[in-house]
Image (spheres, rainbow, N blue to C red):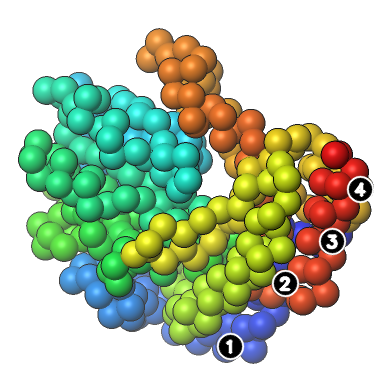
């Protein structure tokens, strides 16, 4: 089987460095909020060119902490996309606020800024765009709308570490950026991990307090917080991966270029496109397919992994029935949920594997007429 993502190959490439890093943590006697975490925060600040970076337990916690740090909660609304992983909306609901969905752009699969204004109410406090599959959202109009309506912008950049808009890294454009270091992410670790970045000192200070039980001094607590710290082993591993991230993303982009060259002329297939001024780092490579079931089944039979991201938009999930949405409320999101199919994408796909994937897709599409 050619996997969608090959974690074994990924971590074998840094095995010697990783073992040394783990040994270093083991010998240090510091396992939570120690020197590795502090050094990672400093190094990632330099990479992202952001003044403040705070390591946290995971990407979902990063979103929750960002909302909480901005005092967003009961009675508030946050505008976001229904076509994303559940954690985006879940974080909004977790702090007591309400996710307000607007439809997506047909090419980028990201929130469509032209729909945002009409979704704004007196309860709206923030916009949460998602840089889906590694493609940056259309941030310029989003930032303009936010400024005009005095709204915060929280970037869900959990799938997009290293991508950029006009040379500026995603996550650093809005008020707060949130990242996940789940093992399958472009910058991943061997466990859970997350990051919050911000340009605002008071927000950074609040998140540092919130992530550690609302405490600035041991056993003294200023508010109700969370237990969400990036542990030392994960921080040490991330320091290694961070030095390789640009090369790994370029490998993904090279594979994406090959896919585009080979698949873009096939009938019934639409390949993802990068919008001018953005750098797409292809966390996932999702093609649009007229007959997804046929292609998916055929690829699986040929030993090529594939997956659906995402089969049911958030506005139609059972947990959000109370919001009153119906089918066709967000037609583009619903269309993409029926058409998108992810094919293997990771930095270590060999030329032979890429050729096999393309050959199988071409054969299956031809068979299907």
Disc ID at residue 359: 3
Disc ID at residue 349: 2
Q: Residues within 10 Å of mark 4 (few under 14, many from 20)?
A: few
Q: CA distance from mark 3 to mark 1?
A: 36 Å
Residue topped by disc 1: 17
- Tell me if 74 is positioned left or right of 293 in this view: left
Q: CA distance from mark 3 to mark 4?
A: 14 Å
Mark 3 or mark 4: whose residue is earlier in sequence: 4
Residue topped by disc 4: 301
Q: CA distance from mark 1 to mark 2?
A: 22 Å
Q: Residues within 10 Å of mark 1 (few under 14, many from 20)?
A: some
- Tell me if 287 is positioned left or right of 295 in this view: left
Q: Find numbered disc 4 in the image and state the secondary structure of the residue it sits on.
A: helix
Q: Residue at x 41, y 57 (%)?
A: 275
Residue 257 can be seen in this image: yes
Q: Are marks 4 and 2 in contact (CB under 8 Å)?
A: no
Q: CA distance from mark 3 to mark 2?
A: 15 Å
Residue 210 can be seen in this image: no
Give the label, 4 or 1, closer to the camera: 4
Mark 1 or mark 2: whose residue is earlier in sequence: 1
């Amino acid at each position: 089987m050619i996997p969608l993502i090959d974690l074994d190959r990924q971590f074998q490439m840094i095995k010697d460095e990783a073992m040394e890093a783990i040994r270093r943590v083991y010998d240090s006697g510091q396992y939570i909020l120690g020197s590795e975490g502090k050094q990672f925060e400093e190094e990632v600040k330099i990479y992202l060119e952001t003044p403040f970076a705070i390591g946290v337990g995971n990407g979902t916690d990063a979103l929750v902490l960002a909302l909480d740090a901005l005092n967003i909660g009961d009675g508030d609304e946050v505008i976001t996309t229904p076509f994303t992983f559940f954690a985006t909306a879940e974080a909004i609901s977790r702090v007591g606020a309400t996710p307000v969905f607007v439809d997506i752009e047909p090419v980028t699969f990201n929130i469509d800024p032209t729909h945002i204004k009409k979704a704004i109410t007196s309860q709206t406090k923030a916009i949460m765009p998602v840089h889906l599959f590694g493609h940056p959202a259309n941030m310029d109009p989003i930032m303009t709308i936010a400024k005009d309506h005095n709204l915060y912008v929280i970037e869900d950049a959990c799938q997009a570490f290293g991508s950029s808009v006009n040379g500026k890294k995603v996550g650093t454009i809005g008020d707060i950026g949130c990242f996940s270091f789940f093992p399958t992410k472009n910058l991943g670790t061997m466990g859970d991990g997350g990051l919050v970045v911000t340009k605002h000192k008071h927000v950074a200070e609040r998140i540092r307090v919130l992530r550690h039980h609302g405490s600035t001094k041991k056993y003294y607590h200023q508010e109700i917080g969370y237990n969400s710290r990036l542990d030392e082993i994960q921080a040490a591993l991330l320091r290694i991966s961070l030095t390789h991230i640009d090369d790994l993303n370029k490998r993904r982009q090279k594979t994406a270029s090959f896919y585009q060259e080979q698949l873009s002329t096939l009938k019934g297939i639409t390949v993802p496109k990068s919008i001018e001024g953005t750098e797409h780092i292809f966390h996932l490579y999702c093609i649009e397919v007229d007959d997804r079931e046929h292609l998916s089944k055929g690829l699986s039979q040929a030993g090529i992994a594939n997956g659906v991201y995402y089969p049911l938009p958030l506005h139609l999930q059972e947990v959000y029935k109370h919001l009153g949405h119906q089918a066709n409320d967000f037609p583009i999101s619903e269309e993409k949920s029926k058409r998108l199919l992810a094919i293997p994408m990771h930095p270590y796909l060999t030329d032979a594997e890429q050729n096999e994937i393309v050959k199988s897709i071409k054969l299956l599409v031809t068979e299907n007429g």
